[in-house]
Amino acid sequence: MPDTQALVNDFLNKLKKRKIEGSQATAKQTAELLRSVISQTRVPYTNQAGALIDSVKAVGERLIAANPVELAVGNIVRRVLQIIREEDLSLTTAAMAGLNLSAVSDDEDDSGRNDHPVLSAAAVAAASRSTLRPPSLRTLIEDVPDSTAIPHTSSSGGDSEGKSKSADKSSRSRKLKHDVIEAVNELIQDISTCHEQIAEQAVEHIHQNEVILTLGSSRTVLEFLCAAKEKKRSFRVFVAEGAPRYQGHLLAKELVTRGLQTTLITDSAVFAMISRVNMVIVGAHAVMANGGVIAPVGLNMVALAAQKHAVPFVVLAGSHKLCPLYPHNPEVLLNELRSPSELLDFGEFSDCLDFGNEIGAPLLHVVNPAFDYVPPKLVSLFITDTGGHNPSYMYRLIADYYSADDLVVQRRSTSGN
């Protein structure tokens, strides 16, 4: 087995040096790393979920602090924490249900006794919080016994009963890790196939003889458009080049290769061409809890143009891009500045220096932001791997993936950074 600490340090270096780009790549590699961490974490007999949560949080805080702009990293850390809680709750519920059945069978002759009532939904919810507290459920669920809190009856089989309970704890520990790892494997599979799941919905949104506008390059958008083409939809695509990195050039070439009618335009021509467009389809870097979108720079201009001409603005995003934080949270970094060399050659830049003083202070400053923020009021529809959703519904969708208790991971990592 590879050393977990070495894997963590290697991934941290890649994040800090920006050697990993794109939400899908960072999300998938984060999930794979956390799977290794969980696999090699030694859990005690009691509070197994708490041990796994502490281990994942310790690594997750370092990963988030390494590159706060890559919100997909924090998303996956929180998703894995939620997986641990859900799997522990499932095992706890099953164990207590078995205990209740056992108690009923022992006392079935005495119909007047009900020492072990059927657990209510509130009791099950309280049991889920046991992962952060001592293992005994006596303090969490009043009058409901726990397997570790049941008094031992004096009998000749007392020793064997104790060994049996110890074996059950060890078995439950292995079962928890196994179930968590299986759930993380499913998460990794979902991240890998989110493009296909989103693309399956293309035929429902793209119709015959439409004109689609996009900006820059997005694999999700590419697969979405090509899926509609495979369904015999005939349409045209306008691709804004996405300066200064000109990723739109790559997308335009790929679309032409796959047989789509494509027109490449400059970013400044978006307002001039938007009146001919039926729909704008773009990708996203992250989707915030309020339905706002952190997207490649230039997309806010496209969204404003679409709103001005009443053109639907559709955002494609896998579930790993759904972030439970809001843009106003101080720990959210909406932007980062890329190298000025993408805008201006260093040789040209040297001509703009003032050599009249000793330090050569520049008269020209170059600012090259990487992202735009598109407010939810400019978005018409989100299409995720779970279907299409209105911006107002995103906070409810995001709540299904994350626990409120896990938001402290982001705050701790940024406050200590």
Image (cartoon, rainbow, N blue to C red):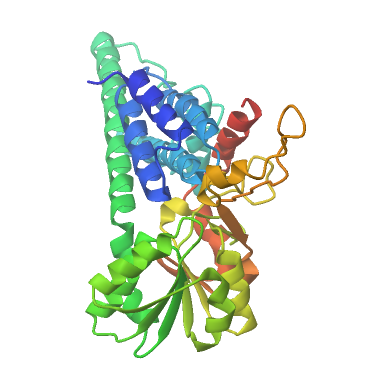
Q: Quadrant of the C terminus?
A: top right
In-front residue for pair 42/117: 42
Q: Residue at x 56, y 27 (%)?
A: 139
Above or below for 341 versus 166: below
In percent of the image, x 32 and y 41: which residue is there? Answer: 184
Position of residue 242 relative to residue 175, above or below, is below
Is residue 350 visible in the rendered image? The answer is yes
- State the image coordinates of residue 227 (x, y, percent, origin top left): 27, 73
What residue is at 49 percent from the left and 84 percent from the top? 277
**Placement of the N terminus among the 4 image quadrants:** top left
Q: Is residue 112 visible?
A: no
Give the side of residue 137 with respect to residue 111, left or right: right
Q: Residue furthest right?
A: 357
Where residue 178 appears, as percent x and y from the top left, is: 26, 33
Where is residue 113 drawn, in percent x and y?
44, 37
For the image shown, how many numbered marks are present on the structure?
0
Residue 225: image quadrant is: bottom left
